[in-house]
Image: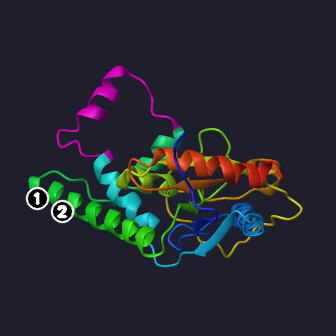
Amino acid sequence: NNLSLPQKIRVGVILECDSVPLNPPMKRIIRDAVDKLSKSPLIEIVPLTDFPSFQYGWELLHGYFTSDPKNEIMTNLTKSGEKMIKSLIFLVEANNSFKTPKTFEDFYELGEARYQVKRHWLKIINDVNLDIILCPGASHTAPKHDTFGNCPYTGMWNLVDFPSLIIPFGKVDKDIDLDDPSIKYCEGTLQTYDKDVLDGSPGHIQLVYRTLQDENVLKVGEIIDRVLNKS
């Protein structure tokens, strides 16, 4: 309740990471959100271009997810008789080229790589004096059930321990969001876009800030949600 914010909130904007391309509706929805925010007297938009690769962040996080040298997780799952869901199979197959840490040296290298990614994000926030970062939460809008695969846009913040918040905004419009065959989707993410199936599917934005600054994310999120969805 005692958190004080500047009169004008500096929002660092990531429209898209080249390593994880967005599908057509998410490209539009993110730009629509930024355009609407830029017209508010409460918001100052700061475009960000030099930031860590979200696909690289996912690769590092995958190392933590799969750090199971004795393969106990899959062994116990197999014993249970429970079948893996379709999206988990997709995720495992898409990431089988990623390195899984097994030795002390592997874990040390993984920890050092994680530290360097976090250091880069902190430098961005400090160098341009940001109050929040805005970016996609996924490369697509809400997909069909059990088709979700890799999640680099949220996984990055798990990796560096930054609090984040998803705010619903916008919807797929099949008359506007036409398919773009030139998009080469990141392996492991949703590979197709069907405008007829996803028409009306909800979009979103994601807000992120430094470790232990959860209150800042919630307070700024309240203001941004009001600008986007209630004005």
Q: Amino acid at mark 1?
A: Glu
Q: Is residue 76 magenta?
A: yes
Residue at numbered disc 1: 105
Q: Amino acid at mark 2?
A: Glu
**Residue 148 appears in the rendering:** no
Q: Is residue 21 above or below residue 110?
A: below
Q: In the figure, is residue 228 to the left or right of 70?
A: right
Q: Is residue 80 above or below residue 7?
A: above
Mark 2: secondary structure: helix
Residue occupying image coordinates x 45% and y 64%: 54
**Dot 2: within a 10 Å radius of its alpha carbon, few (fewer than 14), some, or many (20 or more) residues?**
few
Is 133 in front, or is 102?
133
Do the residues bearing badges 1 and 2 touch, measured as CB atoms within 8 Å? yes
- Percent position (x, y) of residue 95? 39, 56
Q: Which residues are magenta?
A: 65-85
- Percent position (x, y) of residue 19? 50, 71
Residue 109 circle label? 2
- Percent position (x, y) of residue 209? 47, 56
* Residue furthest to the left: 104
Residue occupying image coordinates x 58% and y 67%: 10
- How many marks the image carries: the answer is 2
Q: In the figure, is residue 212 to the left or right of 30?
A: left
Residue occupying image coordinates x 21% and y 63%: 112
